[in-house]
C-alpha cells in the first residue's frame, strides 16, 4: 500500500483505452505456491472489466479459483483513482472482493489519500475456512525538499475470524543521485493483533520492524528501465527478535512506450539469514503488459 503511494508521485497518466495482462507467481519455504493470471480492459472513460484465474497449492493440498470484477481508473495531474469491485470463487467458496485507492495532491509537496480493500485470506487454512478481511487506511506523502520525503499509511485490518489488526507503515526517503535514481531509505512497519496466534495466518500479538535500504531506478541502453532495491533490518515480536531482509530487481518499458511492460523478481524473509532450513523465505515474480487500443 505504501509502496503504491510512493510510486504514484512519479507515475505518468494512464492510457485512455487499453488491454492489459498480469501474471503473478510466488512460493515460500513452507512450500505454499500461488499462481494468479488476469486480463483486463479499460475504456476511454476509465471504466473496464477484469477476469482471471488462480491456483494455490501445498503438499497434499490444492485450490483453484476465478475472478470477475468491474474496474475504474483515472490518473490526472492532481488526483489518481483506482477501484475494483467483483466476485472471486476460490476453493469452492464465493467472496466479494473490492479495492479503492484515492490520491489527491493538496499542495505542491503534499499528497493525501485513502486506501480500502476487501479480499480473502490466501493461506491453506484461510482458503479452506473461507476467511476474508477488510482493510482501511489513510495515506500521506510530503516532500520536505527536493531530496527528502516521508510517506505514511495507517489504518486497521478487520478479519472475519474476529481479529483486528491496527497498523502503521512509514518510509523516509532521501535522494542521493538523480541521474541513477539512487535513494537511501528507512522503512518501518508496526501492528498488533487483538486475537493473536491464529493458526490460519501469521499473527503475533505485536510486531515491529525497521529496515535501512538503497533503491535505484535508471534507463539502460536507452531502451528499458532498470529498478532494484536491497534492505536489511530487524523484526521484533512478543515472542522473538530476528534480522530481516528483502531485495528486488525489475525491468520495464520506457515511459513514452506505447506498449507498457514490466517484469520484477522480489524476495524477502521473516527469519535469520543464518538459520538454515528453518528460515522463512518468500519469493515472487510479477509480469505485466499493457497494450493501447
Image: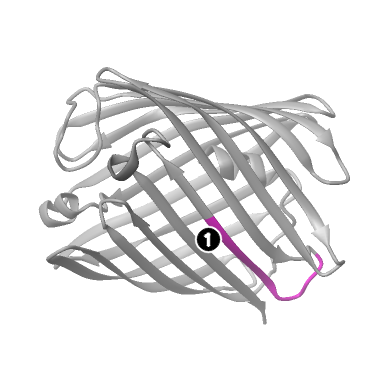
Q: Nearer the viewer, residue 15 or 143?
A: 143
Placement of 281 over or under 62, stated as above or below = above
Above or below: residue 187 compared with residue 182: above
Q: How far across and down, in percent of the image, does residue 22 sit?
A: 50, 70
- Left or right of residue 236: residue 193: left
Residue drawn at 29 percent across, 64 percent down: 87
Picture coordinates of residue 169 (x, y %)? 49, 28
Count all numbered tags in the image, as a single digit: 1
Q: In which quarter of the image is residue 293?
A: bottom right
Tell me the crowding category of disc 1: few under 14, some 14 to 19, or many 20 or more residues within 10 angstroms, Cα based: some
Camera-nearest residue between 181 and 53: 181
Residue that extends furthest to the top in the rendered view of this protein: 238
Examine the rendered structure and indicate whether residue 203 appears above or below residue 88.
Answer: above
Q: Which colour scheme is used?
A: one colour
Q: In the picture shown, does residue 148 fall above or below 85?
A: above
- Image x and y of residue 109, in percent: 77, 29
Q: Which residue is found at the position 73% from the left and 43% from the top?
A: 78
Q: Is residue 24 left or right of residue 263?
A: left
Label 1 sits on residue: 72
Side of 290 where 254 appears, left or right: right
Residue at image position (36%, 29%) is 156
Furthest residue in direction bottom, as rendered? 293
User: Is residue 110 found inside the magenta-colored segment of the image?
Assistant: no
Magenta region, residue range: 256-265
Say which element carries label 1: strand
Residue at screen point 14% across, 39% down:
199
- By secondary structure, the bulk of the magenta-drawn segment is best described as strand
Amino acid at each position: 500500500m505504501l509502496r503504491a503511494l510512493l510510486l504514484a508521485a512519479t507515475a505518468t497518466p494512464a492510457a485512455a483505452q487499453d488491454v492489459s495482462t498480469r501474471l503473478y507467481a510466488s512460493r515460500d519455504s513452507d512450500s505454499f505456491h500461488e499462481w494468479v493470471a488476469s486480463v483486463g480492459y479499460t475504456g476511454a472513460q476509465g471504466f473496464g472489466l477484469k477476469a482471471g484465474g488462480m491456483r494455490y497449492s501445498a503438499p497434499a493440498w490444492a485450490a483453484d479459483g476465478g475472478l470477475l470484477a468491474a474496474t475504474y481508473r483515472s490518473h490526472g495531474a492532481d488526483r489518481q483513482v483506482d477501484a475494483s469491485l467483483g466476485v472471486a470463487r476460490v476453493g469452492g467458496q464465493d467472496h466479494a472482493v473490492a479495492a479503492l485507492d484515492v490520491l489527491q495532491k493538496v499542495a505542491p509537496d503534499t499528497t493525501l489519500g485513502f486506501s480500502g480493500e476487501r479480499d480473502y485470506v490466501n493461506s491453506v487454512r484461510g482458503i479452506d475456512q473461507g476467511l476474508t478481511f477488510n482493510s482501511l487506511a489513510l495515506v500521506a506523502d510530503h516532500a520536505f525538499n527536493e531530496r527528502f520525503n516521508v510517506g505514511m499509511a495507517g489504518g486497521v485490518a478487520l478479519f472475519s475470524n474476529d481479529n483486528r489488526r491496527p497498523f502503521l507503515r512509514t518510509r523516509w526517503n532521501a535522494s542521493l543521485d538523480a541521474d541513477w535514481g539512487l535513494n537511501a531509505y528507512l522503512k518501518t512497519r508496526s501492528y498488533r493483533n487483538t486475537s493473536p496466534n491464529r493458526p490460519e495466518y501469521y499473527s503475533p500479538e505485536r510486531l515491529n520492524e525497521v529496515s535501512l535500504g538503497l533503491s535505484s531506478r535508471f534507463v539502460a541502453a536507452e531502451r528499458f528501465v532498470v529498478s532494484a532495491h536491497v534492505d536489511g533490518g530487524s523484526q521484533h515480536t512478543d515472542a522473538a527478535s530476528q534480522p530481516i531482509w528483502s531485495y528486488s530487481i525489475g525491468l520495464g518499458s520506457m515511459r513514452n512506450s506505447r506498449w507498457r511492460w514490466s517484469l520484477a523478481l522480489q524476495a524477502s524473509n521473516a527469519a535469520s539469514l543464518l538459520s538454515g532450513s528453518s528460515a522463512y523465505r518468500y519469493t515472487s515474480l510479477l509480469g505485466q503488459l499493457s497494450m493501447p487500443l
